Amino acid sequence: MSNDPTNPYASTSMPTESNSIPAGVDPALLAKINAIVKDAGQFWLAMILCLCCSALGSVIIGIWYAVRLMQWNAIANSQSWLMVPNAPSGSLQAKFQGARTKLIIGMVFGFVILFLLFAYVCLLFLGATAPA
């Protein structure tokens, strides 16, 4: 029988998230950690939506992920229990540690898109002001 009431099919040998979180952790901090992990997990979707649907989204995605990366660094420095080496797969620690790479990819992608948009606008401006 599984120990996790939210997932009856979970393995009994895998730790549940509640087992990997130390007692006394602020619920607001846990909500922030989960938001960072969630945003990092959706970086491919965010990039695709920003490219396909809205040019404005592709301008702010780099800034959004840069802010999330700064929040990740602040939490990683203040909460040593999140940075345990060899964290069990699927635990909050493993998800949090894996979020860093995804946040960096999202941030770089956003800044590249912002740079390309800025270069395009500059080329349009220079082309419009060039004598014929």
Image (cartoon, rainbow, N blue to C red):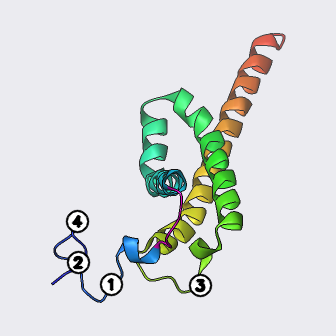
In the image, 33 versus 104, the foreground residue is 33
Instruction: Spot the residue most to the right.
Output: 131
Please state, as top left, top right, bottom left or bottom right, where the N terminus lies in the image.
Answer: bottom left
Mark 1 and mark 4: span between their CA atoms? Answer: 14 Å
Callout 2 environment at 10 Å: few (<14), some (14 to 19), or many (20+)?
A: some
34 relative to 6 in the view: left or right: right
Q: Secondary structure at mark 2?
A: loop
Mark 1 and mark 2: span between their CA atoms? Answer: 7 Å
The spot of residue 62 in percent (x, y) is: 63, 43
Q: Secondary structure at mark 3?
A: loop
Q: State which region is magenta.
A: 21-26
Mark 1 or 4, nearer chain start: 4
The spot of residue 122 in percent (x, y) is: 76, 25
Checking the image for residue 14, the label placed there is 1
Mark 3 and mark 1: span between their CA atoms? Answer: 17 Å
Q: CB under 8 Å between callouts 1 and 4?
A: no
- Look at the magenta stretch and give its main secondary structure: loop
| Residue name at image x 25 percent, y 74 percent | 4
- What residue does disc 2 label? 10
Callout 1 environment at 10 Å: few (<14), some (14 to 19), or many (20+)?
A: some
Q: Secondary structure at mark 4?
A: loop
Amino acid at pointer 3: Pro
Q: CB under 8 Å between callouts 1 and 2?
A: yes
Checking the image for residue 6, the label placed there is 4
- What residue does disc 3 label? 85
| Residue name at image x 71 percent, y 20 percent | 124
